[in-house]
Image (cartoon, helix red, strand yellow):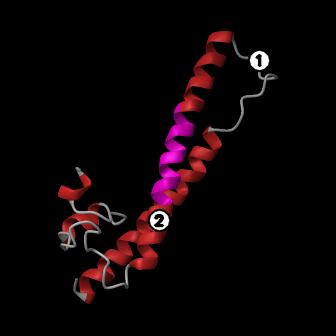
């Protein structure tokens, strides 16, 4: 990977990290407990509990992505960055731009 491509990718990772951090904060707000003192109806409470469960799943997924992006940022200057961990072939730059946290090429990721 060329130095110019790494710089662009590093910028993209930092931008995605900032956006993902904001998403985590938003999702944390949505997963706060629903207090029994709130005067909402039974159906509304069940709907709120269901929405909270969906938000918790999204929060777990977003936190995982955040950790992966942090790892990608710490590894970007490593010569092995952008090389598939299984087949040892370089990724296409477009894959890294779309998913900078990737550690496998498309073919190996499907396995």
Q: CA distance from mark 2 to mark 1?
A: 38 Å
Residue 59 x/y as whole percent: 54, 45
- x%, y% of residue 10? 37, 77
The 10 Å Cα crowd at callout 2, few under 14, some 14 to 19, many 20 or more, is some
Foreground disc of the pair 2, 1: 2
Q: Residue at x 33, y 66 (%)?
A: 100
Query: In which quarter of the view is residue 76 placed?
Result: bottom left
- Please tell me which residue lies in front, 81 or 36: 81
Q: Which mark is residue 17?
A: 2
Residue 9 to residue 103: above or below: below
Left or right of 107 in this view: 78: right
Tell me the SS state at disc 2: helix
Start-end of magenta stretch: 54-66
| Residue at the disc numbered 1 | 39
Which residue does the image show at 26% across and 66% down from the upper left? Answer: 86
Q: Is residue 88 above or below residue 104?
A: below
Q: Quadrant of the N terminus?
A: bottom left
Q: Is residue 110 magenta?
A: no
Look at 32% across and 75% down and name the residue there: 9
């Amino acid at each position: 990977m060329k130095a110019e491509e790494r710089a662009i990718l590093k910028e993209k990772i930092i931008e995605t990290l900032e956006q993902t951090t904001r998403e985590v904060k938003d999702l944390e707000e949505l997963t706060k407990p629903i207090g029994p003192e709130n005067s909402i109806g039974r159906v509304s409470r069940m709907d709120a509990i269901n929405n909270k469960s969906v938000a918790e799943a999204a929060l777990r997924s977003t936190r995982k992505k955040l950790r992966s992006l942090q790892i990608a940022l710490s590894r970007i200057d490593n010569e092995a960055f952008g090389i598939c961990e299984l087949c040892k072939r370089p990724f296409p730059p477009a894959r890294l731009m779309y998913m900078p946290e990737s550690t496998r090429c498309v073919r190996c990721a499907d396995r």
